[in-house]
Each structure stands twice: as C-alpha cells, then as structure tokens.
Image (spheres, rainbow, N blue to C red):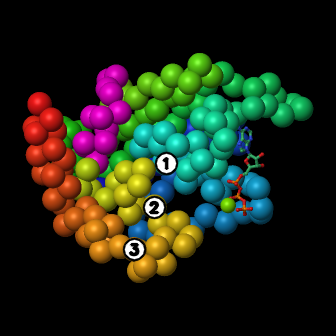
C-alpha cells in the first residue's frame, strides 16, 4: 500500500523555514497547542494534491497560504510543499520506490507541479492518484463532520465514495475524456 513518508514545506502558512515532517507506516498522532500548525499539515497535503479552492485550505484567497511574515521574519514570495510517498510495492505507475510530488505557488497566483523533479501538469498528478484514495477530495482526508455527510449523502454521492474505493473512477474518467474528443 502507498503511504506518506514525509512532507517538506517551505513558505507554506506557518512553515516559514524548510520544515520536514516524518511519518511512518501505521498510526501517527500530531499533538500541539492551539495555533501551532497541526491543521496546516493537512492543508499542506490538500495543497499538493491540487486544491484550487482557497476556502478548503482555510484561506480567503490562494495567496493566503504563503508565509506572510512575522515581526522577526519577512514574508515569503512563494510556498513550496513536497509529499514523498512510498511506492516500493509499485502500486503507483511510476518507476520509482519513492514518488515525490511538489507544488509551488507564487504570489502571482501561478502554480507549478513536479513529479519526481520533472515539471508536470496538475492533470497528471490527479490521474496518477486516481483510484488510490489519494486526492484533494478523496477519502485520504476525513475531516470533522464528513462521516455524517457520508451517512446522510444522496445515494449517487455515496456511490462515488464506493467507486473510488473500488478503483473504477479512472475508467469512468477515461470514458468521459474519450467521449469529449
Ligand atoms: P487548533 O488546535 O486550534 O486547531 P492548529 O494546531 O490546528 O490549532 P493551525 O490552524 O494549523 O493550528 O495553525 C494556525 C497558525 O498558522 C496561526 O498561528 C496562523 O497565524 C498561522 N498561519 C496561517 N497562515 C499563515 C501564513 N500565511 N503565514 C504565517 N502564518 C500563518
Ligand atoms: Mg486545527
């Protein structure tokens, strides 16, 4: 199974300096005082997976994720986050044991995405993770209230969650793409 090995963030929200957060296989709990940056870690994951809604990462505009300075340290011009995922069982169709996905956001609002160092479009990242349960709105992140949402969802919406878990989303996506051509 693919798992998150670490996150590196620089200039993203409260992570002004390059910060590396290590995860291991199994359960990791993040504890800390209010406002210390726990939720910012989740925002960082959503950010790399291509979140385009500022509200979903608790901002009013995308630029709000760029470190905006403190009395001791000036603001940054860009936010960079890299996720390193363990692919030693080759589940992701990338010929590497570690899959690194990076997003850089500039103050201009422009974003760049990289896959193991090579520049890619967001579409390639979205397709790579499709059906792996990994994505900005996939079930890799279950936020407060979401369990209730699933229970009270319309049958079609609940079906979408099951389809992602069953691994058929990419086929539906490809069918839609080919119908558009
Ligand atoms: P709680 O326990 O209350 O949920 P938390 O540990 O989840 O807290 P976060 O919401 O992750 O805390 O972090 C909030 C902190 O991130 C605030 O101190 C806020 O000032 C800081 N922060 C958010 N955006 C930026 C930014 N662009 N630049 C600098 N700091 C930021
Ligand atoms: Mg929080």
Magenta span main SS: helix
Q: Is residue 47 visible?
A: no
Between the C-alphas of marks 2 and 3, the distance is 17 Å
Q: Residues within 10 Å of mark 1 (few under 14, many from 20)?
A: many
Whole-percent x, y for residue 7 in the image? 50, 45
Residue 180 lies, in percent from the top left, at 15, 35
Quarter of the image for residue 75 reads top right
Mark 3, secondary structure of its residue: loop
Q: Are marks 2 and 1 in contact (CB under 8 Å)?
A: yes
Instruction: Give the side of residue 84 with respect to residue 38, left or right.
Output: left
Which callout, 3 or 1, points at the residue further toward the start of the chain? Answer: 1
Residue at image position (18%, 60%) is 167
Query: What residue lies at 53% left-to-right and 66% top-to-bottom?
Result: 143
In this view, 103 is above or below 137? above
Residue on which the image places disc 3: 153
Q: Which segment did they paint magenta?
A: 118-129
């Amino acid at each position: 199974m693919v798992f998150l090995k670490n996150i590196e963030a620089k200039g993203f929200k409260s992570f002004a300096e390059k910060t590396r957060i290590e995860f291991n296989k199994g359960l990791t709990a993040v504890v800390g005082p209010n406002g210390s940056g726990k939720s910012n870690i989740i925002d960082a994951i959503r950010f790399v997976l291509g979140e385009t809604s500022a509200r979903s990462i608790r901002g009013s505009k995308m630029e709000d994720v760029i470190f905006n300075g403190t009395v001791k340290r000036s603001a940054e011009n860009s936010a960079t986050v890299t996720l390193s995922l363990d692919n030693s069982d080759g589940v992701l169709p990338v010929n590497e044991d570690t899959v690194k996905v990076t997003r850089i956001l500039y103050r201009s609002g422009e974003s760049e995405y990289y896959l193991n160092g090579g520049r890619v479009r967001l579409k390639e990242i979205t397709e790579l993770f499709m059906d792996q349960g990994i994505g900005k709105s996939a079930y890799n992140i279950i936020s407060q209230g979401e369990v209730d949402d699933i229970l009270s969802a319309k049958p079609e919406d609940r079906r979408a969650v099951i389809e992602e878990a069953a691994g058929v989303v990419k086929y539906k996506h490809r069918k839609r793409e080919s119908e558009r051509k």
